[in-house]
Image (cartoon, helix red, strand yellow):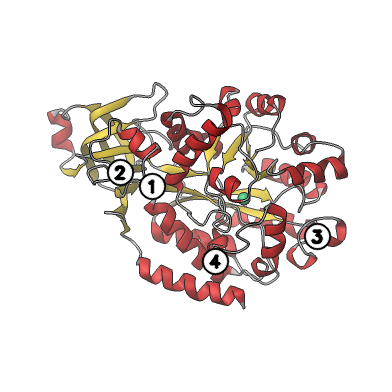
Amino acid sequence: MAGSTLIEGGYVVTMDPAGTELPRGWVAVRGGRIVSVGEGSAPSDVRDAFPDRIDATGALVTPGLINTHHHLYQWLTRGWAQDSILFDWLVALYPTWSRIDEGTAGAAGAGAMAVLARSGCTTVGDHHYIFPRGSGDIVGAIAHESRALGLRLHATRGSMDLGESQGGLPPDFAVETTDDALAASAEAVTRHHDGSFDSMVRVAIAPCSPFSVTSDLLRESATLARDLHVRLHTHGAETVEEEAFCRERFGMSPTDYLESLGWLGPDVWMAHCVHLSDEDAARFGATGTGVAHCPSSNARLAAGIAPVRALLDAGAPVGLGVDGAASNEHGRLGSEIRQAALLARLRDGAGAMPVRDALRMATTGGARVLGREREIGSLEAGKLADIVLWELGEVEHAGIADPVAALGLGSLPRVRRMLVQGEDVVVDGHLVRADERQIAGRVVEAAARLRG
Ligand SMILES: [Zn+2]
């Protein structure tokens, strides 16, 4: 059981519904949860009850960041197909990815999650959808690595069953049968999903995309997830090529197509959603369908700029995601706050994305997207103690007018300290439960093995 800790002296951004900020605030933590939050010096009864102190002087204190979309395995294929659009990039990478197994997926996950943690991410959403025959327990391997680092994981059991010979994009050797995918999805949930309040591992069901999955698998995955009381995730409306694919094959836009298969609703989140009409955005808001906004990946693949302002104004849950590192070699979630602020302004004007709105997407927005808004995403009494202290005393940020602008517009501050469930995960910018050099060595070896 985690101990009692008082974090004091920092600029605390609670991300509570009122947007409360405490220029010299304190946060009291016990048993992995936030007990109380206040301004100024903590009262003497609090100081007596929380003898362990973390000095946050000169730091910005925020909720832990929540990543809503990733493909951790892609950590092994960074730097490939550097100038391609999505479909060409996928075709270039599918053959290598289809050699993934639980060993290489674990090494990739360790590398990708180490970088996420060092950029302030406490909850990792992963979308894994390639399961070659005989590849072992890939979801289990990723969960093993998240536990070792001390991070909260929202894994998925994804799938593809629409190979090239049936008009899909992936090669036939990279896809499963519909029945195998459904059976393995149910098994992954049974084996690894924990629905408790302080769960460290949850599992969602996540067929990959309209151009790599049959209508049957999409429809039946939705039914299965609802039977098992877990969430649903996929890619949607990422590129103009996907839009053309859906119109030609189904006579509908991607959003209409997914809706026709039961895929709009408060238990669904979709990655990207770049090519939405105003009416689509309103439907996301009305149905509570979540969006994982991945601004760097969308720029890397020249997919476009998602209408995030319209989605937020419609009331849709919107979180941030780094996406797989093969389309975002940066891999740092903290940096996506700045990227989201900048791209929204390029699309919709200077007032389209204040830094506090971008930070809200990375925290409470992500919690809503993952169905964890009661547990994580803000610094409020009763929530889990997932907390980041960002160092603002170094030359990059010292003297800046607004500590939140340091995080949302400046270079990404070093993580002075990061707690998950009240326990240290990062101290002075480095992992405390794992050896970063050893992880780097595993990544080098696994990347070479994957290349064959
Ligand atoms: Zn993706």
In the image, residue 327 sits, relative to residue 266, either above or below, namely below
Q: Could you say which disc has been placed on residue 120 in the image?
A: 1
Q: Earlier in the sequence, mark 4 or mark 3?
A: 4
Does residue 144 appear anywhere in the picture? no
Q: Tag 1's secondary structure? A: loop
Image location (x, y in percent) of residue 122 = 41, 47
In the rendered structure, which amino acid carries the disc numbered 1? Gly
Say if mark 1 contacts mark 3, CB within 8 Å.
no
Q: Quadrant of the C terminus?
A: bottom right
- Which residue lies at the image location 30% right of the left edge and 31% below the top edge? 402
Between the residue at mark 4 and the residue at mark 3, the CA separation in whole angstroms equals 23 Å
According to the image, label 2 marks what residue?
390
User: Is the CB–ligand 1 distance for label 4 below 8 Å?
Assistant: no
The residue closer to the viewer here, 445 or 350, is 350
Q: Tag 3's secondary structure? A: loop
Image location (x, y in percent) of residue 75 = 53, 62
